[in-house]
Image: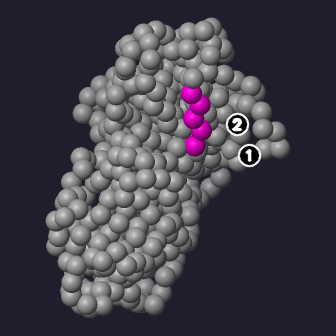
Amino acid sequence: MSGRRRFAGWLGVFALLPGAESGFSAPPTADALVPSGGQAGTEVPLLTVVGKMDPWPCQAWCSNPEVKFSPGEKAGQFKVSIGKGAKVGPCLVRIHNAEGASEPRTFVVTQLREIIEDETANENPAQAIAVGALPVVVNGRLDKSQDFDAWKVSLKKGQTLSARLDGYALRSGIDPFLHLYDSKGVRLALESDGPTNLDPRMEFTAEADGDYVVAVMAIDHPPSTSVSFSGSAKGAYRLTMAIGDLKEDAASVGDGEAPGPDSLPPGATVASVPLSGFGTLEKAGEADRVLFSAKKGSNLLIELDAVDHGFPTDTVLILEKPDGSVIREVDDDKASRDASYVFKVPADGEYVCRITDRFGRGGKAIRYFLKISEESQDFTVSSEQLGMTVKAGESVQWKVKIERQGGHAVALVATAKGLPSGVTAEPLKLDGKKNEGTLEIKCGKEA
């Protein structure tokens, strides 16, 4: 590795202000987008931005260049055009005027059919609105106290309904629940927190032909003193439903890739490092064994991931010698409930990764991803600032934090790219021991 490593980070949106006072009173705010997504190649005729945008019209910026926002006549209303070739997945949207820009909100582009909740009452299973053929994405909102949205799906005996709700991930201020009822109003299933956050997922296999109702409810997040079901103007959600497996990249608010098939070597095969692949704990109480060879003196990073791939597995990594004696058992690491361990190999030979679920669960959903590789020096960059406003002829400070891994101690240079015309930033030099610093962003008088 060279003595200096350069990185460039996109810093978000800058709003440029004239030196003199303008007629605007404050930057706009955006608390929610309703709906929060759309299908590529279509238009959303009416998208409402919940927040303050005075005076109107304001403009919208989107990180996906194929998603165009056009302000309507009424404050907070936009028409959204989504290009046929728009990249599928989440993108960021900011509302801005001459005074500044809002915090970013998430808009999700999919290839699936999408429907938008109207004002029709669907507040109990008997009033459920039929969603039609699956797969589908329902864009809804829990907008009042005790709100309850009901959606009807038709299933054949033996068909498995997969459902995922995104609300917490949209920062809608909700901790949502999914309920499933039969045609008589009997509740058959209830799901709350999912494997990655507070948003629930559900899989249900029908025992008979018929209509079933998927209901959405939520409590406040952060929690309030009341535990009753709640709602608010910003309580937007996206409910994705399909028959069979629901691909994580189909309509997810997350940006992870869809997991692949099982690809780890069989338990009796001794693999060489580096190695990586998916596996499944198919039976309750099952433990998978992956054998690998290693050289004395190697520092091997063993990563056992489930949460990052959207799996519900609570992974446990047990590193063993071939005779079964335990070298190290690792459950949760500092960042999540996934397991990781740096193995300093004491001698040439064969070793075993034994993989289990903390609660002994099994099934097609109890999956994991194992990666074993030489530990490398690396770093990540983060900032708590989501955007900033700078006046012409003035400057602002942008704080960045560096997290170093694997003994990384190389000097770094931070630069800002993609800044507006007339806005500059001097490179920030960080020696090998420094883990934070400040970029000075300068705005020219004529910017």
Q: Quadrant of the C terminus?
A: bottom left
**Residue 427 higher or lower than 331, as above or below:** below
Image location (x, y in percent) of residue 363:
39, 42
Residue bearing mark 2: 219
Look at 53% across and 70% down and name the residue there: 334
**Residue 31 higher or lower than 240, as above or below:** below
- Three-letter code, disc 1: Pro
Measure how far apart labels 2 and 1 are at the Cα level: 7 Å
Local secondary structure at mark 1: loop
**Residue 308 higher or lower than 240, as above or below:** below
Magenta range is 189-193
Look at 19% across and 64% down and name the residue there: 268
Local secondary structure at mark 2: strand
Look at 44% across and 63% down and name the residue there: 316
Q: Quadrant of the N terminus?
A: bottom left
Image location (x, y in percent) of residue 328:
42, 78
Magenta stretch holds residue 419: no
From the viewer's side, name the closer residue of 46 and 180.
Answer: 180
Q: Principal SS element in the magenta part? A: strand
Residue 87: mark: none
Residue bearing mark 1: 223
**Most extreme residue toward the right, as rendered?**
225
One can see residue 71 in this view: no
Q: Quadrant of residue 57?
A: top right
Magenta stretch holds residue 191: yes
From the viewer's side, name the closer residue of 351 and 136.
Answer: 351
- Label 2 with label 1: CB-CB less than 8 Å: yes
**Most extreme residue toward the front, as rendered?**
323
298 horizontally vs 362: left or right: left
Total labels drawn: 2
Circle 1 packing at 10 Å, graded few (<14), some (14-19), many (20+), is: few
Q: Quadrant of residue 179?
A: top right
